[in-house]
């Protein structure tokens, strides 16, 4: 049995645990929102929201989310980043089950059809994806971070993040001002832009986790000393990007429905994780033309059907109105400034 099989299995278990934790986080936010609704219909105000950490369901979700990420971190030492990131789409399959049993949401036929395509796409990815996972020295890892292609890729990502952050900020302001009179395309554009910013930055935690896993593997097999500026720098970057991803995920779950935002976040995270791994580790060099073609087909097949299963988002929802109000005072101050 190849090491990549072990890594893929650990990653699948970890991804399912992450998705279960994500749905528990969402359930905690739902409970928090429910407790804020006044018991008497004649009451005009709302009960002040309690801090989310006070809800046991949310705390349990954090635990599963943490354990799942630990398993994924271990898996990076056994398989290529592009392969493991692609397998992350299993979260959309498990998300359907958890949304039904945990959040009591209905699952439509088109969701089940989309799920079948995702499973088929994952079969292609496992069969034709990169099965190699070489161990790099710290000098080789550092050199890859200064590679021209990787630096250009990072510059492109900066532009992508800036553009989608602007789109989201503009949409948030328009919703706060115009409400339900907004154009219909904002129903998908708003969560999409939120997911792109989250995934583009948060997916770098996968790259840093892969680098740390590589260093740990090197230390165990070759006696490499982990005490060094490079190790601590990668660790700091990993904690920063992983913390950003966790914060964005938690905020997104408080704003959008889980069956909407979880697939979008997962698509963005997977796409940018694969691209980052291909550019940084140059994993495309070990794939033949036919393997690259079938891997691409597998990835598209596992992602192209996901939008079919994503429902429209209600821009007038109570949760989003509460969040959108934050930008109104800022807009007023700007207009008078």
Image (cartoon, rainbow, N blue to C red):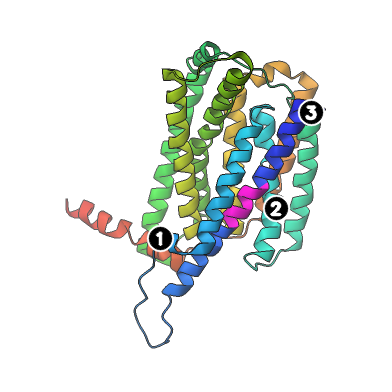
The residue pinned by badge 2 equals: 94
Compare marks 1 and 3 and give the one earlier in the sequence.
3
Query: Which mark is in front, 1 or 2?
Result: 2
Magenta-drawn stretch contains 21: yes
Q: Position of residue 45 (x, y in %)?
A: 34, 78
Q: Dividing the picture into quarters, in which one does residue 106 lie?
A: bottom right
Q: Position of residue 120 (x, y in %)?
A: 80, 43
Query: Which mark is in front, 1 or 3?
Result: 3
Magenta-drawn stretch contains 111: no
Can I make out residue 256 in this image? no
Task: Using the image, determine if residue 293 lies above or below residue 11.
Answer: above
In the image, taking residue 183 as reference, residue 294 lies left or right, namely right
**Mark 2 crowd level (few <14, some 14–19, many ≥20, 10 Å Cα):** some
Q: Dividing the picture into quarters, in which one does residue 301 lie?
A: top right
C-alpha distance separating marks 3 and 2: 23 Å
Q: Residue at x 82, y 28 (%)?
A: 1
Per the picture, the main secondary structure of the magenta-coloured stretch is helix
Query: Which mark is in front, 3 or 2?
Result: 2
C-alpha distance separating marks 1 and 2: 32 Å
In the image, taking residue 17 as reference, residue 332 lies left or right, namely left
- Between 17 and 97, the one lying in front of the other is 17
**Mark 3 crowd level (few <14, some 14–19, many ≥20, 10 Å Cα):** many
The residue pinned by badge 3 equals: 128
Q: Residue at x 59, y 53 (%)?
A: 21
Compare marks 3 and 2 and give the one earlier in the sequence.
2
Q: Which residues are magenta?
A: 16-23
In the image, taking residue 209 as reference, residue 15 lies left or right, namely right
Q: Residue furthest left?
A: 337
The residue pinned by badge 1 equals: 175
Task: Using the image, determine if residue 79 lies above or below residue 56.
Answer: above
Q: Are the residues at dot 1 and dot 2 in contact (C-beta closer than 8 Å)? A: no
């Amino acid at each position: 049995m190849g090491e990549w099989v072990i890594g893929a299995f650990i990653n699948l278990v970890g991804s399912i645990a992450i998705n279960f934790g994500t749905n528990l986080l969402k359930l905690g936010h739902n409970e928090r929102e429910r407790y804020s609704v006044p018991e008497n219909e004649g009451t005009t105000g709302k009960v002040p929201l309690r801090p989310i950490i006070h809800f046991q369901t949310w705390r349990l979700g954090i635990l599963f989310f943490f354990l799942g990420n630990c398993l994924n971190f271990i898996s990076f030492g056994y398989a290529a980043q592009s392969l493991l990131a692609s397998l992350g789409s299993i979260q959309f399959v498990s998300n359907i089950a958890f949304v039904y049993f945990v959040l009591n949401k209905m699952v439509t036929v088109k969701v089940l059809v989309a799920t079948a395509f995702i499973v088929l796409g994952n079969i292609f990815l496992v069969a034709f994806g990169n099965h190699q996972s070489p161990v790099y020295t710290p000098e080789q890892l550092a050199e890859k971070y200064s590679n021209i292609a990787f630096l250009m890729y990072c510059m492109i990502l900066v532009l992508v993040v800036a553009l989608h952050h602007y789109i989201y900020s503009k949409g948030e302001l328009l919703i706060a001002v115009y409400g339900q009179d907004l154009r219909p395309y904002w129903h998908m554009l708003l969560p999409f832009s939120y997911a792109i910013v989250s995934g583009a930055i948060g997916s770098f935690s996968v790259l840093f986790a892969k680098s740390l896993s590589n260093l740990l593997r090197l230390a165990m097999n070759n006696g490499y000393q982990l005490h060094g500026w490079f190790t601590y720098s990668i660790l700091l970057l990993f904690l920063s990007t992983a913390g950003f991803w966790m914060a964005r995920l938690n905020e997104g779950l408080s704003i959008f429905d889980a069956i909407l935002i979880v697939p979008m976040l997962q698509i963005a995270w997977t796409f940018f994780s694969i691209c980052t791994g291909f550019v940084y580790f140059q994993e495309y060099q070990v794939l033949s033309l036919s393997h690259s073609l079938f891997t691409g087909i597998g990835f598209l097949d596992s992602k192209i059907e996901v939008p079919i299963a994503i429902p429209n988002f209600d821009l007038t929802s109570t949760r989003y109105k509460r969040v959108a109000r934050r930008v109104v005072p800022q807009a007023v101050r700007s207009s008078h400034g």
